[in-house]
Amino acid sequence: MSGHSTIERPPSRRTAALRPVPTPSAAGPRRRGRLSGLLRNSVVQGVLILVALVWITPLAGLFLSSMRSERDNASDGWWTALTDPSQLSLDNYGALLKDSGIAEAFGNTVLISVPTTVLVVAIAALAGYAFAWLDFPGRDGIFLVVVGLLVVPVQIGLLPVAKLFGAVGLFGTIAGVVLFHVAYGLPFAIFLLRNYFAEIPREMLEAARMDGGSEWRIFSRLVLPLGRPAIASLAIFQFLWVWNDMLVALLFADSSSQPLTVALQSQMRQFGSNIGVLAPGAFLSLVVPLVVFFAFQRHFVQGVMAGSVK
């Protein structure tokens, strides 16, 4: 009848028995898996936080020491500035930057590091593309020579190159320091970029050639954008190596072309343990690589292992 409402019957015992019921034996391992995953993540995060604190503590100590007076640094530790911020000031940095020798050394460091990084990246990118995708006589043999140069220590070439630079008038100049860094930075740079470029699919390059693209157009419009992570990682590595170098600059640079590392070493010999001079100078030398690293850290993480395996 249309006036009667339909009454749903409760499921029978047989129908209810056929429905799957989660058993404790199946849910238990699932919960234990989630718990173990959370514990592993917590342990990894805890270790990373501990490593970050260990790395940041000396940096924070150097920064606070550079903003305290010589008397405060001699009387107690840098951590007292955390509870007494009145100790902090920029007087040490003002005095340091007014020193013409330090200001000139900072400019020399920029003039050495930036051109070296640009030259190494540009030459290595061109050579890496040639070794990876161009056929020319002796390609494999030349590349083996480049790989062999990776094991040659810098100390072996110091004296012969110094004699050569002295003969051609480059000894004691910024150009001589730049050329030395470029020469010893190219083997690793070419090896890294060649292996990365070799992983680009051949079909992609062949399609570009069939469309009428020249080798330079393929290199600039296709290979360089695809190799940006590896190129950024190489640029960061090269910049940090040159910026923090003191051995090569100590030998090949004179008083007018010395970088910041050599100038600080000279200040240390003159003033002994004067923390008011060394601490701001050391932090000034450190802050630029930190800014460069954090500015390009996204590319660095993507390309740090670029080209290591094929």
Image (spheres, rainbow, N blue to C red):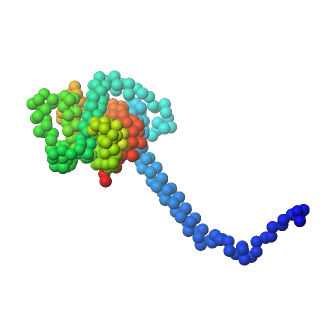
Question: What residue appears at the point 72 percent right and 77 percent down from the top-left corner?
Answer: 14
Tell me where residue 11 appears, x and y as whole percent.
76, 71
Q: Is residue 52 left or right of residue 237?
A: right
From this viewpoint, is residue 199 visible?
Answer: yes
Tell me where residue 110 appears, x and y as whole percent.
30, 30
From this viewpoint, is residue 59 visible?
Answer: no
Q: Quadrant of the N terminus?
A: bottom right
Q: How many marks?
A: 0
Task: Indicate whether 234 appears above or below 107.
Answer: below
Tell me where residue 153 appears, x and y as whole percent.
19, 46
Query: Considering depth in this image, is 239 or 270 the residue closer to the camera?
Result: 239
Q: Is residue 268 left or right of residue 80?
A: left
Task: Indicate whether 83 appears above or below 95.
Answer: below
Tell me where residue 167 appears, x and y as whole percent.
9, 30
Q: Is residue 14 left or right of residue 244?
A: right
Question: What residue appears at the point 10 percent right and 35 percent down from the top-left corner?
Answer: 163
Query: Considering depth in this image, is 8 or 255 the residue closer to the camera?
Result: 8
Task: Indicate whether 3 appears above or below 144.
Answer: below
* Residue furthest bottom in the image: 14
Q: Quadrant of residue 266?
A: top left
Query: Considering depth in this image, is 61 or 232 the residue closer to the camera?
Result: 232
Question: What residue appears at the point 16 percent right and 49 percent down from the top-left corner?
Answer: 141
Question: What residue appears at the point 52 percent right and 62 percent down from the top-left corner?
Answer: 36
